[in-house]
């Protein structure tokens, strides 16, 4: 007997997909969410709930796709992505900062006026319960996502804040307001030490809702298209039919499914034996993220690191010299080393790697032995993350096979633009300068892994950045929105896929470019805003 047709099938129960599904169900739609990873109806296991650690981001964890990206031609790097109900919001660092007004207004200027800052603001207000600023204009107090900021001081956070003031940077007490960039506490989706993923904020209150069904452990292989109309999706268990299909599988998963379904650059699809449904050249192109590096240092004395200490307290956002984009550099002082963040219990990361050696080796494949050794040697050092928030370089995602079980190749193509290299040099030098200030120097025994001679020479510093390059894993833009005259656009501003009726994409892949803050809050807002668009709002 054929399965009934749903009003909407949402592929991906993650950071955008669950808010979308929840709001559509509230509006009376019959919604089915299909998630490749596990569902945890009784609540997330400890490794996913514990906001003080990111144990599920360790290579090989079952809640993490085994994805490796190429940051540059010669630099492979693990790219953790959520493979669980809740998506990447179930395993990330709980950084919940909105994109800036300038970000969204630039989207509108590109021809996407429905996504201007003032049009998107109601979604941000509706989704949040800000415990400090909820009653202030532009904020919400009764939404599903609790937004908190660190209250108790910490010697390192206090010293770093004083160091930024010493160098003349302004305070930014509310990073979800429209003030100038500066130093301030990070808004976080954390409540009582629990990482509040969308599985908790949007799905848990609707468990048992007659209009909402979630199926975990159900990977989707392709979209079913008949006569130019999406009619459902194909799973291993068989077809699932729906009046409308929404891909919310993330900036890797959604373009991957489009390509597998014959929607993408026609020549590349034909070369892999995939029948072309719609020639959409922009699928998988224009990938953007936040390239980053870590300036490590050894503390002069023991700093408090209780088990429940969140790894991040605040951030310095600032504008690189000569940049037209405000706040295009971000510096994040971490309060504890990766060795205490990327595990859930002591030695769990090592034990997990030994239990899953093949997965771990796949994730680390291509990483140089010298880099692995250097990372191991400095595993207990603290560090300042330096991220470029608006890169000029663009990456791409492409298939290497028509087999849906094989993940696509992700090429970041970082540092291809000279302006990106210049701004990262500036950010690294700023981190080193902060560590030398009167406010921070008493806590710093020495900087590790970055000699003064390298710091002083542009060419040597470029080499150092390239050798130590990482990524914030804030992927976006791989199925970006744009007006009809934009040849690289994959969806219109209603998020409808070009050339196929009844098919939309709702996640960070539709961003014209990644926001100049971490995208988690914006990803939730995209789901909220998409629900408005689907219901006529």
Image (cartoon, grey):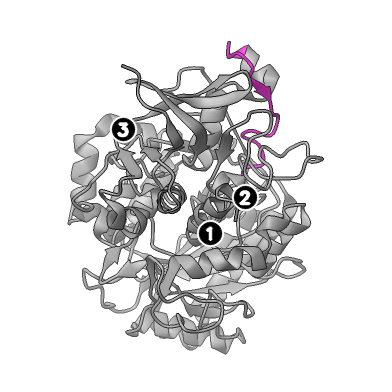
Residue 404 picture location, percent across and down: 45, 22
Quadrant of residue 286 within the rendered picture: top right
Which label's residue is closer to the chain start, 3 or 2?
A: 3
Q: Note whether 460 is above or below 31 in the view shown.
A: below
Residue 127 picture location, percent across and down: 45, 65
**Which residue matches tag 2?**
511
Residues tagged 3 and 1 counted as in contact (Cβ below 8 A): no
The structure residue drawn at horizontal position 62% and vertical position 39%, both measured from the top left corner, is: 479
Element type at mark 3: helix
**Disc 1 from disc 2: Cα separation:** 10 Å
> In the picture provided, is 435 more to the left or to the right than 310?
right
Mark 1 Cα within 10 Å, few/some/many (few <14, many 20+)?
Answer: many
What's the magenta region?
Answer: 271-287
Residue 328 picture location, percent across and down: 65, 65
| Residue 522, disc | 1
Secondary structure mostly taken by the magenta-highlighted segment of the chain: loop
Which label's residue is closer to the chain start, 3 or 1?
A: 3
Q: Quadrant of the C terminus?
A: bottom right
Q: Nearer the viewer, residue 325 or 380?
A: 325
**Which residue matches tag 3?**
359
Res 452 visible: no
Residues tagged 1 and 2 counted as in contact (Cβ below 8 A): yes
The structure residue drawn at horizontal position 22% and vertical position 48%, both measured from the top left corner, is: 41
The structure residue drawn at horizontal position 51% and vertical position 38%, both measured from the top left corner, is: 246
Q: Nearer the viewer, residue 378 or 156?
A: 156
Q: Quadrant of the N terminus?
A: top left
Res 303 visible: yes
Mark 2 Cα within 10 Å, few/some/many (few <14, many 20+)?
Answer: many
- Which residue lies most toward the right here? 485
**Disc 3 from disc 1: Cα separation:** 31 Å
Q: Nearer the viewer, mark 3 or mark 1?
A: 1
Element type at mark 2: loop
């Amino acid at each position: 007997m054929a399965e009934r047709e749903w009003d909407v099938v949402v592929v991906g129960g993650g950071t955008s997909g669950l808010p979308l599904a929840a709001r559509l169900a509230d509006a009376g739609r019959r919604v089915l969410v299909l998630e490749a990873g596990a569902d945890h109806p009784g609540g997330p296991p400890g490794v996913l709930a514990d906001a003080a650690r990111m144990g599920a981001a360790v290579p090989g964890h079952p809640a993490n796709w085994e994805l490796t990206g190429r940051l540059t031609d010669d630099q492979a790097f693990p790219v953790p992505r959520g493979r669980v109900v809740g998506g990447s919001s179930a395993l990330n660092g709980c950084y919940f900062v909105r994109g800036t007004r300038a970000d969204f207004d630039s989207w509108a200027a590109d021809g996407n006026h429905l996504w201007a800052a003032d049009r998107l603001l109601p979604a941000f207000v509706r989704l949040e319960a800000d415990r400090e600023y909820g009653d202030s204009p532009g904020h919400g107090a009764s939404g599903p996502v609790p937004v908190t900021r660190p209250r108790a001081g910490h010697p390192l956070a206090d010293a770093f804040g004083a160091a930024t003031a010493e160098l003349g940077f302004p305070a930014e007490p509310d990073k979800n307001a429209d003030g100038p960039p500066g130093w301030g506490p990070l808004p976080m989706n954390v409540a009582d030490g629990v990482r509040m993923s969308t599985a908790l904020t949007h799905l848990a209150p609707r468990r048992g809702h007659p209009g909402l069904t979630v199926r975990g452990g159900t990977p989707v292989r392709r979209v079913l298209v008949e006569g130019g109309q999406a009619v459902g999706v194909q799973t291993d268990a068989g077809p699932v039919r729906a009046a409308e299909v929404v891909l919310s599988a993330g900036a890797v998963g959604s373009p991957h499914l489009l390509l597998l379904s014959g929607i993408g650059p026609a020549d590349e699809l034909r070369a892999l034996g995939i029948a072309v449904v719609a020639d959409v050249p922009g699928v998988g192109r224009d990938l953007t993220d936040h390239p980053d590096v870590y300036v490590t240092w050894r503390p002069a004395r023991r700093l408090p690191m209780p088990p429940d200490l969140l790894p991040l307290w605040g951030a310095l956002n600032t504008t690189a010299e000569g940049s037209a984009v405000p706040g295009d550099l971000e510096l994040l002082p971490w309060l504890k080393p990766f060795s205490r963040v990327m595990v859930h219990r002591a030695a769990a990361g090592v034990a997990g790697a030994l239990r899953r050696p093949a997965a771990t080796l796949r994730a680390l494949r291509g990483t140089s032995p010298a880099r692995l050794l250097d990372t191991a040697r400095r595993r207990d050092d603290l560090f300042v993350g330096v991220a470029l928030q608006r890169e000029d370089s663009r990456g791409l995602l492409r298939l290497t096979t028509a087999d849906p079980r094989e993940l696509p190749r992700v090429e970041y193509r970082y540092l291809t633009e000279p302006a990106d290299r210049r701004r990262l040099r500036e950010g690294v030098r700023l981190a080193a300068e902060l560590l030398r200030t009167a406010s921070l120097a008493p806590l710093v025994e020495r900087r590790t892994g970055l000699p003064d001679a390298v710091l002083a020479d542009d060419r040597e510093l470029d080499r150092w950045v390239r050798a130590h390059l990482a990524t914030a894993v804030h992927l976006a833009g791989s199925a970006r929105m744009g007006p009809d005259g934009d040849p690289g656009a994959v969806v219109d501003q209603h998020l409808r896929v070009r050339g196929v009726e009844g098919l939309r994409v709702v996640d960070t892949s539709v961003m014209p470019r990644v926001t100049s803050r971490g995208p988690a809050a914006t990803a939730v807002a995209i789901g909220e805003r998409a629900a408005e668009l689907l219901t006529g709002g």
